[in-house]
Image (spheres, helix red, strand yellow):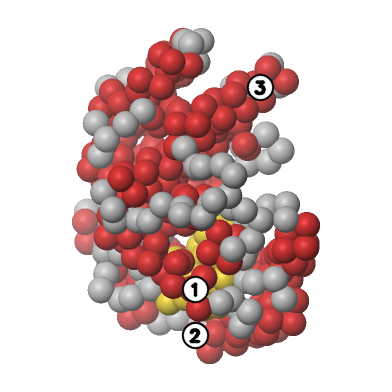
Amino acid sequence: MSTANKAIFILTAFALFIGACNRSVDDDHVTEILNSWGRTTDIPPEFFYADDITLGTQTGFEQTFRAATDEWGNYGPLEWWIVGSNLSDAQALLERYCARRDARGDESLKDCMEYSTQATDFLEWADKAAKVVDSGKPWSNAGRQGYAHWGIHLFSSSLPLSWAGVANVPVEDDQYVLFHEYFHAVQHAHLLPEWPRNWEQRKNRLGPVWFMEGSADFMGIMTTKKLRESGKLPSETRDLGWKWNSNQEMIKKMEMGLRGLEENPDLRLADIPYGPNKKIAYDLGAWAIAYLCDASGPNVLLDEFYPKLNELGWEGAFADTFGMSSEEFYVVFDKFLLLPTHEQLKILP
């Protein structure tokens, strides 16, 4: 297919795809999304807070986000919606969210209020955060919800516990979570938006769960560590009775991941989907990425792997970048998992 015909095909397919999502679009809008997607932008991110989120929490969140974009680039346009612990404020935030979707032409106000992920998450997260405030037992959630067909990266978070001063959670934890989530924007920015939203069809480009989530976990933990050591991110100054340690977090991931495999002997890391066993893929995936970065260089994901993703697909980009197929890697990595902890730690930056 010629370049010109391919461009026409992509434009047509993407327009049909958006039309199927009940969004009214024109060719100029589709072209704008296709031309801008995957590039860094000067458009500042937009943050939307529930009314009970304090100014100090907002400041901590945005300063940390700025450190992430300074490190990896500003991929946008981006919206981030942050829920607190008050149900009525969460309801008001949901109404603002759906009004914005309707005003932009993303989806109708009615559909958003009735069917969107946020319609469930915002109220559920506020309820759980209120219980955290009362009990002191930490819980949080955050995620990237899309949406390339709206031309934005869309994120939501529950109450950021450290910046809110709740449940003795150190600031390093919220930093790591934010960087983990934002790395998903970086990943998706390297996947052109003509690919369908169906996860089964997208995974040939994005790769297995261990790679997607392991990359975000490893990059989140180790990049925030580096930025704290250089003074670009603050460390926790409160006496919480314990201190965050990046290597200890990785050790815990190894222990939990191996325990998960022992409890599920039929599971292969390569095949673990999102679902009840996904934490195994997150935890051992972080170590798998650590192994690959140690062998190929700390910047290999952003400098080599992701720029090849659209052209070669995940398996092709993997082999071209790391010099072996994914199946060959699994054999090598299985042997690494048998090493004693002090040997495994040597690969961490």
Circle 2 residue: 104
Work out how far the residue at label 3 is from the one at label 1, CA to CA, in angstroms: 39 Å
Circle 1 residue: 56
Q: Is residue 29 left or right of residue 119?
A: left
Check the image and report above or below for 13 versus 202: below
The reply to whether discs 3 and 2 touch (Cβ–Cβ < 8 Å) is: no
Give the image location of residue 303, x and y in percent. Answer: 22, 43
Q: Residue at x 25, y 27 (%)?
A: 296
Q: Nearer the viewer, residue 82 or 73?
A: 82
Give the image location of residue 330, x and y in percent. Answer: 46, 18
Check the image and report above or below for 124 versus 198: below
Q: Residue flagged by tag 1: what amino acid is it?
A: Gly
Q: Can see residue 197?
A: no
Secondary element under disc 1, as helix, strand or loop, is helix
Q: Is residue 43 left or right of residue 83?
A: left
Question: Which mark lies nearer to you, 3 or 1?
Answer: 1
